[in-house]
Image (cartoon, rainbow, N blue to C red):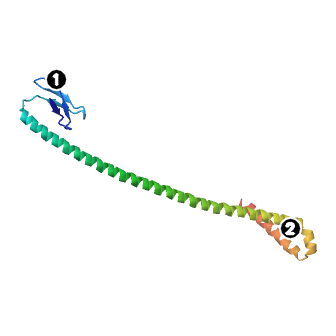
Amino acid sequence: MIITCPNCNKQFKIDNSLIPDQGRDLQCGSCNHIWFYNIEEKKNDVLELKQEIINEDIETKTDNKEKEINDKQQQEEIIKTKINNKKKEKNSEKQKNIKTLKKTENKVSKFFSYLIIFIISFVALIILLDTLKTPLINVFPGLEILLFNLFETLQDIKLFIIDLN
């Protein structure tokens, strides 16, 4: 005999001797639904008619399910492409941000390297002028006042920096 699960309409072929006259509980192997089944006497013509109806129902349900599955797959593909596009946009934005950060870091590091070179060169010039002060004053007599003022200014700057601490 063929028994249909009332929950999911799955059909099972079961031996008549397994179901007593008073009926018994059955469990669907597909959806695990449990229901009480009682054998009822039915005419063969009615059974065939119901089987045809059930077969038509099953065919239409499978067609509908296939359409639903196809629709869901298309929706999943659309969502996946949107997610991939968003990921690509985020990656490109990150790369742009990294490039701009590198550019600003390069500009800042170049500025500080030039500043350090300027300070070292200025200190070297002061040391050179201090070392060669007397020969330069002998050659250029008016340079003595300028060098004296320069050294006094440097002393004042040094004292100012010390006072800041």
For disc 1, the marked residue is: 18
- Quarter placement of the N terminus: top left
Residue 83 shown left or right of residue 15 in the figure: right
Q: Relative to the observer, which residue lies in front, 122 or 89?
A: 89
Q: Position of residue 13 (x, y in %)?
A: 18, 30
Pinpoint residue 91: horizontal percent, then vertical percent: 49, 55
As shown in the figure, which amino acid type bears the numbered disc 1? Leu
Q: Is residue 131 above or below residue 1?
A: below
Q: Residues within 10 Å of mark 2 (few under 14, many from 20)?
A: some
Q: Is residue 63 visible?
A: yes
Tell me the kind of residue under disc 2.
Leu
Residue in view at x 12 percent, y 26 percent: 23
Residue 159 in sight from this viewpoint? no
SS at circle 2:
helix
Q: Which residue is mark 2?
A: 129
Specify whether 28 is left or right of 123.
Answer: left
Q: Single out the mark in the foreground, 1 or 2.
A: 1
Residue at position x 29%, y 50% from top?
71
**Quick one: 160 or 16, which is closer to the camera?**
16
SS under mark 1: helix
Q: How far is mark 1 from mark 2, CA to CA?
A: 117 Å
Residue at point 85%, 71% (across, down): 147
**Figure check: 121 above or below 33:** below
Residue 143 image-quadrant placement: bottom right
